[in-house]
Image: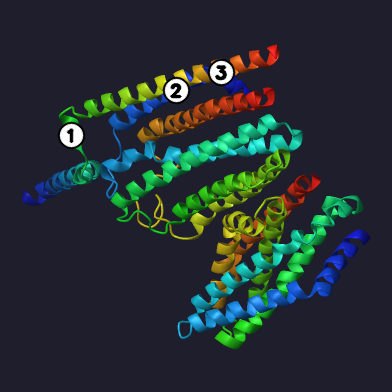
């Protein structure tokens, strides 16, 4: 993150990838599948929100661990601001997912395990911010919230990856829906999908880096006065 | 090792001497079961029995274990010198697990009285119950250590605890529903192994992370 | 004579049959794919480029704003640091 804060090249990479995502995502041929029809292109915009959310939360947890090892308040700023962006991605993912689900599955919320798991992971990080706000002492707040971040994240992973496999999911590959798993994703889709994930995730880190710089500046101001 | 037993003993004697919280939680258990008996009269199928049982275990666990650090408030400085955090958390984990298991058995007994007893396969059912209780008690012990530091503990306990406990709860409920419907071992083997690994993850994380919350 | 011709006739018809079978199998994904409704007309009229152009303009605008925000926050950071060093 310290590196990302200094350098600019990855922002240009982010722009290039997202421009490519828009053009490729709307123009390239896609597999013709029933139920999904043309909306299969949402894959490049909805799914990267989830991948981005998980990648941003992962960054948040890594800085949580770094904080616990060093007691350096800088890492807490990194960690909490990344969590902030992760929540934004999660909310966007849920909203876009509900619109897509309304079209393809017939209702916005259909008790799908992946939908539920994503709602739970949002709850976890909303609780993280409630916890942060409820502790006055700064060092204590940083430490306790880092502990909760690590604890909850490690339990969210089994939720996201194991539970959907236990019961029937409406998501691709299960329950009669056309499959495009990561493994048998159509090569045309894959050519746009992976760059899209990287591009959206970089956009998340970009916004987080601005937030981090602002809150560090604010802290500096408070310390100076 | 000696300190470990001493700490567990201390928790036990504190709870016995006060009596207030223990009788309170017993009454809580009895009244929730009786209330749900009134509410669910005539609607009980095996699935409803199962879901209700686990929901009541969940709420009993969160109420019982949320106190486990609150009572240490005045004594915490004293403990800081007395025992290492690792030993302290092991003592807490063992004590809260034993506490929850006793409550779970009581709940099962009360359920049998009010709702009937659909359990056939006792070894499997109790194995699943024990695994579920391990997950619930250790996760809530950790969450109570976290929420101990915040302003409004009882609300924080629920907000922080429920999302975290969902993996354990879903696994436990689906397993026990299958067991009550007379499933053979090979059909739930995978789920059981997942649950054991989730339990191990929870305990390992608690063990690693607890000292950080305790240090200040 | 007909008895002699018959085998070749049979071979011919079976060859024809096989060829037609092969063609149907090869074409089947295309044929069945065409049944799935896609926005082909929309694409054929070239209107998709309008959509792409509009989204790209918005995206470029957002990136421009982000870069400006980036610069402003960086300048603010430097100013605060300088003030701190002076004071």
Residue at figure coordinates x 47%, y 55% from the top left: A116
* Badge 1 or badge 2: first in the primary sequence: 1
Q: Earlier in the sequence, mark 3 or mark 1?
A: 1
In the displayed structure image, the side of residue B99 where residue B180 appears, left or right:
left
Which chain is disc 2 placed on? C
Q: Residue at x 47, y 60 (%)?
A: A167
* Marks 2/3: CA–CA distance: 15 Å
Residue beneath label 1, please? Answer: C42
Mark 2 or mark 3: which is in front? 3
Chain bearing tag 3 is C
Chain letter for mark 1: C
Q: Quadrant of residue B107?
A: bottom right
**Vertically, is A219 above or below B129?**
above
Question: Colour scheme used in the picture?
Answer: rainbow
On-image quarter of the C terminus of chain B:
top right
Tell me whether marks 3 and 1 sit on the same chain: yes
Relative horizontal placement of residue A23, taking residue A92 as reference (left or right) = left
Taking the spot 33% from the left edge, 25% from the top edge, the residue there is C58
Which residue is pictured at 50% across the width and 16% down the height?
C71
Residue A70 spot, x, y in % from top left: 75, 33
- In percent of width and height, residue A19 lies at 37, 24
Estimate the x, y position of residue C25 in percent, counting from the top left: 24, 45
Circle 1: element type: helix
Distance Cα–Cα, label 3 vs label 1: 48 Å
Farthest residue in the right direction? Answer: B2
Mark 1 burial class by Cα count in 10 Å: few <14, some 14-19, many 20+: few
In terms of depth relative to the viewer, which is nearer, A110 or B216? B216
Q: Determine whether label 1 and label 2 are within 8 Å by CB.
A: no
Specify the quadrant that holds the N terminus of chain B. bottom right
Question: What residue did someone put label 3 on?
Answer: C76
Residue annotated with mark 2: C66
Q: Residue furthest front?
A: A225
């Amino acid at each position: 993150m310290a590196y990302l804060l200094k350098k600019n090249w990855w922002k240009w990479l982010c722009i290039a990838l997202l421009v490519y995502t828009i053009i490729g995502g709307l123009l390239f041929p896609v597999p013709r599948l029933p139920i999904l029809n043309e909306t299969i292109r949402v894959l490049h915009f909805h799914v990267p929100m989830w991948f981005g959310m998980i990648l941003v939360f992962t960054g948040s947890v890594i800085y949580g661990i770094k904080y616990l090892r060093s007691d350096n308040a800088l890492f807490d700023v990194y960690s909490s601001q990344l969590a902030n962006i992760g929540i934004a991605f999660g909310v966007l993912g849920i909203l876009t997912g509900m619109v897509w689900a309304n079209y393809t599955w017939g209702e916005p919320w259909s008790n799908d395990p992946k939908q539920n798991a994503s709602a739970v992971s949002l709850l976890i990080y909303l609780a993280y911010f409630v916890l942060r706000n409820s502790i006055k002492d700064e060092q204590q707040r940083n430490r306790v919230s880092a502990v909760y971040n690590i604890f909850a994240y490690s339990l969210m992973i089994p939720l996201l990856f194991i539970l959907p496999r236990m019961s029937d999911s409406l998501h691709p590959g299960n329950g009669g829906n056309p499959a495009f798993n990561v493994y048998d994703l159509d090569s045309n889709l894959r050519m746009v999908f992976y760059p899209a994930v990287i591009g959206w995730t970089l956009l998340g880190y970009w916004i987080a880096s601005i937030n981090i710089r602002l809150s560090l500046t604010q802290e500096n101001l408070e310390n100076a006065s | 090792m000696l300190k470990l037993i001493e700490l567990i003993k201390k928790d036990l004697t504190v709870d016995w001497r006060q009596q207030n919280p223990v009788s309170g939680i017993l009454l809580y258990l009895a009244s929730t079961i009786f209330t749900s008996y009134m509410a669910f009269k005539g609607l009980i199928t095996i699935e409803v029995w199962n879901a209700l049982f686990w929901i009541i275990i969940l709420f009993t666990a969160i109420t019982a274990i949320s106190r486990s650090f609150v009572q240490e408030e005045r004594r915490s400085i004293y403990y800081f010198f007395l025992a290492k955090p690792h030993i302290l958390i092991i003592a807490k984990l063992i004590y809260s697990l034993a506490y929850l298991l006793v409550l779970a058995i009581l709940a099962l007994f009360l359920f049998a009285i009010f709702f009937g007893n659909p359990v056939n396969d006792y070894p499997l059912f109790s194995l699943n119950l024990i695994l579920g209780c391990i997950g619930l008690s250790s996760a809530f012990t950790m969450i109570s250590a976290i929420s101990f530091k915040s302003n409004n503990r009882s609300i924080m306990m629920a907000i922080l605890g429920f999302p975290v406990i969902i993996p354990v709860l879903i696994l436990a409920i689906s397993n026990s529903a299958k067991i009550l419907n007379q499933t053979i071992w090979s059909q739930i083997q995978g789920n059981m192994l997942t649950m054991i690994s989730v339990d191990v993850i929870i305990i390992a994380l608690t063990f690693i992370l607890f000292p950080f919350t305790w240090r200040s | 004579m007909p008895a002699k011709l018959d085998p070749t006739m049979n071979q011919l018809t079976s060859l024809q049959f096989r060829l037609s079978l092969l063609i149907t199998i090869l074409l089947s994904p295309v044929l069945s794919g065409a049944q799935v409704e896609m926005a082909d007309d929309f694409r054929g009229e070239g209107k998709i480029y309008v959509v792409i152009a509009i989204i790209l303009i918005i995206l470029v605008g957002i990136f421009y704003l982000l870069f400006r925000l980036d610069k402003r926050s960086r300048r603010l950071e430097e100013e605060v640091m300088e003030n701190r060093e002076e004071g």
